[in-house]
Image: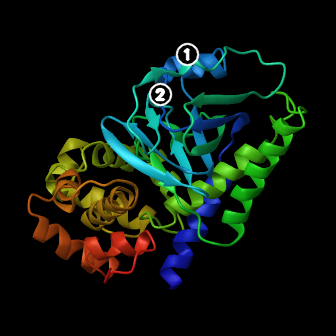
Amino acid sequence: MVAQSATTDAVRSALEQVHLEGAIFLRAEYQEPWAYESLTGPDTADFLAPGNDRIAFFHLIAQGRCWVEVDQQRHWADAGDVVVLAYGHQHRMGGSQPADLVSVTSFIPPPPWPRMPVIRYGADGPRTDVVCGYLLSDDVLFDPALQVFPPVFVVRPPEGPVADWVRANIEYAVRQTSIGAGTPDSVSTRLPELLLIEVLKSHLASAPTSPNGLVAALRDPVLGRALALVHAELGRKWTVVELASAVNVSRSLLDERFRSVLGIAPMHYVTTWRMHRAKDLLQGTTLPVAAIARQVGYEAEEAFSRAFKRECGTPPAVWRLRSRGTPSGS
């Protein structure tokens, strides 16, 4: 419990130093069946924030159910969830029913907008409402080369302050658009920044870190390179010797830097980060456990299941059911 508290405090401290700028920029009402493909990352950045080549953006699911997909990896989100695309990747998004993909530009008018737009697209089936926002940051956490975050992930805030904050942002955006008062300037407040920081805290709270912090490690000349390699090639069969060689330092120096900055040994970090990413995939996708095992560096599903149970207390299949609020016996 003490270790978890230290981890949470470290994540909170690191994220509170991040400078973000952004806005809640539109509300969308999608009716089944519907599906679209976004612009590329740089084109999206230029579309929403001219002069920038990358942004982070998020979708608050106000009601309904939808999926979002990057690189053929599909995540599902329900009302109250927050979908985060930390590096603004090109993505696809759609509802529960099959639909032909269209470009997002076919139904979203190009800015500037006189007021925050309400986008309506789809047919006449059940509706999914989404509030969309974006943020800009030069912080190391949002450097795509380091892959601190997956390309896309879904955060399901537990009941409490974060869930209340998500609902407040949704209600604010809905109210602004419904009364016709919302303009891009009027909604470019700190709300999106504070919201995303709280969501990222929830996401990173289980990531391997220590009172010195993940951000400190990423900025360390040795650890920054080592973590970038581990995050980018999580499925690789890493050893301490191989990782030290890849960043051109001795095994002893690498071990010393991990222990002094992160408080754990290199391979402990690798294993814990693998379990962190595995949780993302178990909770947010329908990938089989065997496929997730391969993505996070285990050839055999059995070996992955043993490692996951050792780290998380339950087998991956059971953890997946519980994370979705489904009784394990059902």
Point out residue 5 in the picture as x, y percentages from the top left corner: 56, 78
- Which dot marks residue 38? none
Badges 2 and 1: C-beta atoms under 8 Å apart?
Answer: yes
58, above or below 167, in the image: above
Q: Can residue 17 be seen here?
A: no
Sequence order check, earlier mark of 2 and 1: 2
Residue 69 occupies quadrant:
top left
Label 1: which secondary element: helix
178, above or below 160, in the image: above
Instruction: Give the residue at mark 1.
Output: 106
Q: In this view of the protein, which residue sits in the foreground, 138 or 29?
A: 29
Residue 300 occupies quadrant:
bottom left
Q: Residue furthest front?
A: 124
- Report whether 302 appears left or right of 319: left
- The answer for how far apart the CA atoms under marks 2 and 1 are is 9 Å
Q: Can residue 78 be seen here?
A: yes
Residue 89 occupies quadrant:
top left
Q: Residue furthest left?
A: 300
Residue that appears at 40% across and 55% down: 284
34, above or below 291, in the image: above
**Quadrant in the picture for the C terminus:** bottom left
- Report whether 56 appears left or right of 162: left
Amino acid found under the numbered disc labelled 1: Ser
Point out residue 99 in the picture as x, y percentages from the top left corner: 40, 31
Residue that appears at 65% across and 46% down: 18
Residue that appears at 40% across and 42% down: 147
Q: In this view of the protein, which residue sits in the foreground, 25 or 306?
A: 25
Label 2: which secondary element: strand
- Which dot marks residue 36? 2
301, above or below 147, in the image: below
Point out residue 153 in the picture as x, y percentages from the top left corner: 45, 49
Residue that appears at 54% across and 26% down: 54
